[in-house]
Amino acid sequence: MSAAEATTTVPRSSAARLPLTIAAFLAATLFVLGLDQFINALTLGAIYALIALGYTMVYGIIELINFAHGDVYMASTFVAMFTIQTLLGRSGAIESIPELVIALVIVFAVTASLMGLAGVVIERFAYRPLRRAPRLAPLITAIGVSFIIQNIIQFAFGPTIVSVPQIIPISWSFMVGESRVPILNLFVVAAALILMAVLQLFIARTRTGRAMRTTAMDRDASALMGVDINRTIMLTFLIGSALAGAAGVVHVLYYGNTQFGLGFQSGLKAFTAAVLGGIGNTAGAALGGFLIAFVEVGASSFGYGRWGGGIVFTLLVIFLVFRPTGLLGSSTGDRA
Amino acid sequence: MKVFNKKGFAALAAVAILAAACGGSSTTGKTLTIGIGLPLNGSALASAGPARDGALLAIKEASIEGYTLVAKILDHAKEGAHNPDQAAADMLTFVGDETVVGVVGPFNSGSAFAQIPVSSEAGLLQCSPSNTNPNLTKDLPGAEISGSDLREGRAANYVRVATTDDLQGPAVADYAYSNGARNVYILDSTDAYGKGIADSFEAQFITAGGAVAGRDGLPVGTTDYSAVAAEAKSLGADAIFFGGVTSDGAPLFRKALDQAGVGALPFYGGDGIFDGTGEGSYIAISGAAAENSFASIAGSQNIPGKADFDTKFMAEFGVAAEGYAYAGYACAQILIEGIKAAVAAGDVTREAVRSAVVDKGAAFETVIGSVTFDSVGDTSQKYISLFKVENGTWVFADEVDYTGK
């Protein structure tokens, strides 16, 4: 469920080697892909990682593959679009830095809080009544919720791809050698890393975070120790969905468009990231998101983008067969 | 996609023909009818309505010695869209009316797939003003259904004045080359349409003397095109071709190219991205990045008889002729010429009309120029028009002539 737990399931020596391994991996990919593609991969990875966190947190705490999570992310892109276009009345890039900062704060705050709320509502009505039911039941309702969200968005915003004003100017950039480094990409990566760091600290250091960890380990024992299980699970959905909301904001900032069908593919990739990283393990999910992005971008940069999906899911199968606990180990790996 | 139940319609058609045969298949009465079978309600009306009016004008103008020529209009749109089942049912109605010797329609290829087995069995000539699906007439390798399947081996009874989609890829390749492209990056949507048009583009572009910097594919549903955009940039491409439709991700790719700093490169596509400027269109989603994009569409924009026709059309209907009015008029002109040839030969049957138009290789002088049909019913006018995005709208750029190729 957390970094603290990860260290208990992963042997000490490999945990110590992890930062070195990541650094070596990044250096190697930078060398192979070149700076342009390296930045593309980091940016895509940041988005996958933010979505993957929601999957892994929910799985960690109630062992549910929340198939609606990808659609919460999709819906959040529309909330972000609505906030930018209607609430803020923006139709293009914001060149003034103070205005941009205020706009970004509002978009992130509105989207993340609305989506967090949506996550709580979904949990309360679609999953909580089925908490003691066979595991297949909540899985089916999750798929149902996924379709409901898609249909609501399709009804409200239509079935076509819609354009969203990119409020961070895409022209803002600086040169590193031959490569143009857009501020937009740096912002996306930085925002994701900050959110992930805050989440890690929250889970590791706060009382609520501890309650989440103990609930993931043993729900009944936690209840006996005085942990409010319903509240803890609700909070998990709140945080996971709010992170998906942040990912949605990042999506519209970076791509400048969205569509109601967005959640399925992105959700599947992010779920794969969560499994690769070790489902239930937040640091692993983030790592898995970046790994998948590097594989996809790597495939495209060698002209094999066509097979990107195949390569990612082959990797998933290999992991499930040979290392079912994922990159960093899983608190519930035996069931993943 | 299964668009119709072939056996079912064939059986129904057989019954109808039997009924017609009992009434005497040789049409010796004084009235001859040209059927007009088009989708004519809801959003379909905007495109197909002018084709109907064009055909009506030609029928009104025609005079055939000893016969009265009338039109019979059937609308096969349901809930605002063409309906192949209704199109097939309407064709049965035409077949059952023994005065009908030719039909103008349908408008959509999907309806044509449903109608041709019915009209073919009855030997009833039909002329489409707009169908472009090559599989309606040709037998292309790998096609799920082909022209000879629809006709069940019979002589062609279906002709069209629009040329086929399979020429679009080559036409765009020739145009891009003449426009200065030498090293093109190709991305396709990995499906039948996208990969098909990209393959035909690639082959012709190499034949023309160009080189392919790189080729890749990303399926519909892909959200991230930044990596392929960066790849196109690093390979030094001087032009981009996208095989696919707007909803496959063409505007997302265009935007990604823009973000990668190569948004000024000419961006070529087929009719899949030629979808106007409305909500969800290529131009609407791409925004400013759409500038310098090119798209093709089957058919010519040069209409030799335009001025004269426009005057007559305005006088008759009180609105300006537009879109498919010319093609609808041309179709009716061709059917009328076929009927006149049959009358002149003293044999006014459906087969005589069909044969006069298709089998004899005759040239028909129409509002859109001289038209001859090959043995499967495809037009000799093989024009592909190219449009370019300028100031947020599609502007006619050029046309490529594949006549004789």
Image (tube, grey):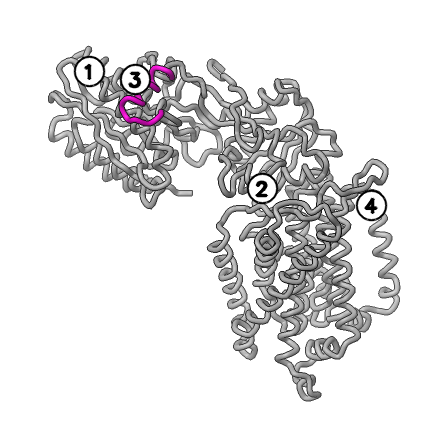
- Residue B298 at what x, y percent from top left? 46, 25
- Residue B312 at what x, y percent from top left? 30, 19
Mark 3 and mark 1 on one chain: yes
Of the image marks 3 and 2, the number of the one nearer the N terminus: 2
Q: Which residue is under mark 1?
A: B63
Alpha carbons under labels 4 and 2: distance apart: 28 Å
Callout 3 secondary element: helix
Q: Residues within 10 Å of mark 2 (few under 14, many from 20)?
A: many
What amino acid does circle 2 point to?
Answer: Gly
Mark 1 and mark 4 on one chain: no
Label 2–label 1 contact, CB within 8 A = no
- In what quadrant of the picture does the C terminus of chain A appear? bottom right
- Residue A59 at what x, y percent from top left? 65, 69
Task: Please report, as a chain letter, where disc 3 is located.
Answer: B
Callout 4 secondary element: helix
With A313 as the anchor, is A118 left or right in this view?
A: left
- Kindly identify which numbered label has been placed on residue B357: 3
Residues shaded magenta: B306-320
- Kindly identify which numbered label has been placed on residue B249: 2
Alpha carbons under labels 3 and 2: distance apart: 42 Å
- Kindly identify which numbered label has been placed on residue B362: none
Alpha carbons under labels 3 and 1: distance apart: 18 Å
Mark 4 and mark 2 on one chain: no
